[in-house]
Image: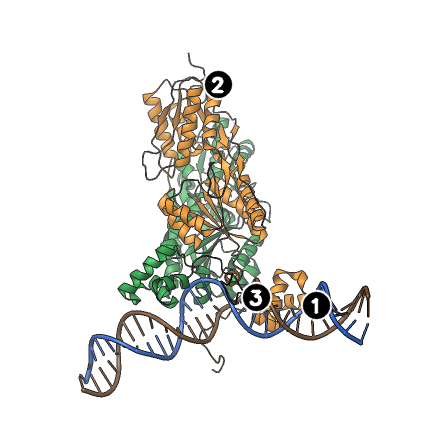
Chain colours: A green, B orange, C brown, D blue
DNA sequence: AAAAATGATGTTATCGTTCTCACGCAGCGG
DNA sequence: CCGCTGCGTGAGAACGATAACATCATTTTT
């Protein structure tokens, strides 16, 4: 009853540094040091504290620590969606580097919408992250403002840009489109097409559009006719959209012999549509995807695609963040899209 | 120079409630109330504060708020991996409910390892979440202890159990296996097989094992010969493992006419192997998957599978958490695995 | 051997918010 | 006209940790 004298706020009941200190016979500050800078306390003290920690089942309160030290050790991560292996791999790559270093990734998804991204950024900034990673370089005015004002390390990824908010670690989507066009052209294909790209301005796959643009420009540069673009994708991209686009292409544009899909997801759907219609791949139709999702390697025929190594990208991002946290300067980084050749692309056999 | 008089700790430079209050001509407490309980301040005060918030670009510090109120509004979420659409959908479902209610999901992945899960739980508990969601009911002793000791709401999912730590919202994996066996048996298949299941004790797909057990038991109960189990999967499950397993099955056990794969990922690999070898599906071989991943609907033939509605499960979890946070009592919830019929399963045509 | 540097620990203030309590003022019944 | 209730507001403590400084004992330097 007479347990607490002043009794303004009741504690949570969980052990604190004070409890550990009391049990070990040292001050809270010594406990703090024992836990975060073990080499700054004497060996005997250290073991006393460690024993007390085990005995009490003490788990430090990082929120309190963050408030006091002004370093939350949280890294915010805004993805378009989790339900895409590439983004999931990116997030796992980042986590694998950050977690062992004592940083906690905070993952959110914006559903490809700039508005939702803004909302997400606002919410996440309230957790006072030490760094912020965003997929993409297109943001709302307010998003950019908030990120700038926060003064923390900001990393934009999955793209390249000339004027990043802070740091940019990604690949050129335009370049990916160029690689696609160059490959298909080198196989002797004359009439190229691309599938992907949204008509709905609100839910736009910004990066997919850049790949399309790169594809178009390179095709033109190579002296081939302007490629057809079948735009009927929506984010999130689903296989069905690839199937629909391929069906339309086969029906309306029989002269096309090679197709670049802005995502392996669409490419797979397109491939299945070819199967359904008995269209030989790559005999009658060459098919090139993007992303190197795991299905690309396993479907029959194996899907030629363009890989961007998301997990490795994640690790690079993690490392750069850690370097920044140690006070070192860091620059951006560009990753080169790599053509992965499987069976779905082959020489043009048409007349 | 004479900016701060005492000057022990320097602030971060970001605006605080104090700044907002000074600008609005009210106390910090009034700012706090204006932001979290707008109906407890007068309309004029409210608008003054809101104006000041906009003018300063103030973003509340939730960490400080958490420390003071002992409610972090963080919900921790431990998944085996992000790179699995079902878990990603689960996470997105949870987020969709929690975020608008002011709760922040904190996602981590344990790579199917109980040790890593323990590590993750320890790290996440240091952020003082208000609730903890875990995939699975098998945890290390220390994990369970920490969760119990934390005293927060704990939800186990993706399984059913008789003695949950706190609440269990999931489906019975055993039941899913039974559904699989019943379906294949009903089609007249006599020699069944299952693919999946790991030999490596350390990286065990615990839930896959339960599906296998349910499959085995139901097969026996239906009076059929004991099913073959091809165990050569490893987590994370990749398509290649399904292909390998199917190849082995076709080579060594030609009498088998129907196969249950513990994951659509494996089922897809197996299907592709059938294509490669010219084995007709479902004519010669019926194939049933689990999970209803999006590829299942798009491959040719469409993959029959067992669906567990992960996104909906996530939303249910989110709602139960919110109810608990409002102080209401809540019980667990069982989700029924549902058979999704497509083209990959058909009647036994063998002699 | 005296002075200075080093090392281990404790004390106090502080981070930015919310909780608790107190205060002043308006309305209201007796 | 007095006390009572209720509303809006403010003052100060508290949450659990760390930074900065202070202290004391010990070692190193010259």
Numbered badge on residue B172: none
Residue contact between numbered discs 3 and 1, judged by CB atoms under 8 Å: no
* Residue A147: percent from left, percent from top: 51, 62
Identify the residue shown where x is 38% and y is 22%.
B227
Chain letter of the residue carrying label 2: B
Of pointers 2 and 1, the one earlier in the residue sequence: 1
Local crowd size for mark 1, using a 10 Å CA cut-off: few (<14), some (14–19), many (≥20):
few
**Secondary structure beneath disc 3?**
loop
| Res B60 → quadrant | bottom right
Letter of the chain that mark 3 sits on in the rendering = B
B82 to B162, vertically: above or below = below
| Nearer mark to the viewer, of 3 and 1 | 1
Residue receiving disc 2: B187
Residue for badge 3: B58
- Mark 2: give few (<14), some (14-19) or many (20+) Cα within 10 Å: some
Residue depth check, mark 2 versus mark 1: number of the one nearer the observer: 1
Spatial CA distance of label 2 from label 1 is 73 Å
Residue at 43 percent of width and 58 percent of height = A15
Residue B44 disc label: 1
SS class, disc 2: loop
Q: Nearer the viewer, residue A180 or A111?
A: A111
Seen in the picture, residue B341 relative to B330 is either above or below; the reply is above
Q: Mark 3 or 1 closer to N-term? A: 1
Is B4 situated above or below B113? below
Quadrant for residue A241, please give it: top right
Q: Is residue A308 visible?
A: no
Location of residue B285 in the rendering, given as x and y in whole percent from the top left corner: 42, 21
Task: Give the CA distance from mark 3 to mark 1.
Answer: 19 Å
Q: Is residue A217 left or right of residue A140?
A: left
Q: Looking at the image, which is closer to me, D14 or A82?
A: D14
Q: Position of residue B67 (x, y in %)?
A: 50, 61
What crowding class fits label 3: few (fewer than 14 Cα within 10 Å), some (14-19), or many (20 or more)?
Answer: some
């Amino acid at each position: 009853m007479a347990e607490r004298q002043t009794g303004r706020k009741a504690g949570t009941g969980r052990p604190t540094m004070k409890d550990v200190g009391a049990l070990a016979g040292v001050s809270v500050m010594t406990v703090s040091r024992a836990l975060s800078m073990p080499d700054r306390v004497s060996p005997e003290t250290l073991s006393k504290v460690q024993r007390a920690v085990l005995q009490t089942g003490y788990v430090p309160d990082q929120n309190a620590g963050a408030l006091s030290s002004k370093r939350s050790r949280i890294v915010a991560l805004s993805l378009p969606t989790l339900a895409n292996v590439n983004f999931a791999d990116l997030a796992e790559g980042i986590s694998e580097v950050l977690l062992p270093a004592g940083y906690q990734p905070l993952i959110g998804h914006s559903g490809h919408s700039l508005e939702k991204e803004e909302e997400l950024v606002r919410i996440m900034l309230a957790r006072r992250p030490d760094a912020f990673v965003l997929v993409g370089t297109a943001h709302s005015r307010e998003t950019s403002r908030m990120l700038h004002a926060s003064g923390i390390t900001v990393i934009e990824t999955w793209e390249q840009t000339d004027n990043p908010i802070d740091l940019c670690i990604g690949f050129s989507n335009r370049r990916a489109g160029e690689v696609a066009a160059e490959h298909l052209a080198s196989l002797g294909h004359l009439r190229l097409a691309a599938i992907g790209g949204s008509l709905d301005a609100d839910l736009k796959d910004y990066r997919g559009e850049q790949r399309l643009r790169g594809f178009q420009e390179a095709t033109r540069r190579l002296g081939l006719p302007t490629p057809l673009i079948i735009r009927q994708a929506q984010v999130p991209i689903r296989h069905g959209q690839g199937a629909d686009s391929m069906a339309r292409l086969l029906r309306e544009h029989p002269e096309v012999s090679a197709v670049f899909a802005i995502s392996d997801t669409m490419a797979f759907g397109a491939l299945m549509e070819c199967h359904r219609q008995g269209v030989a791949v790559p005999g009658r139709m060459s098919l090139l995807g993007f992303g190197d999702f795991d299905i690309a390697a396993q479907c029959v025929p194996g899907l030629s695609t363009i890989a961007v190594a998301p997990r490795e990208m994640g690790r690079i991002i993690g490392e750069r963040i850690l370097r920044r946290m140690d006070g070192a300067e860091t620059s951006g980084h560009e990753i080169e899209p790599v053509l992965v050749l499987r069976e779905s692309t082959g020489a043009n056999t048409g007349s």
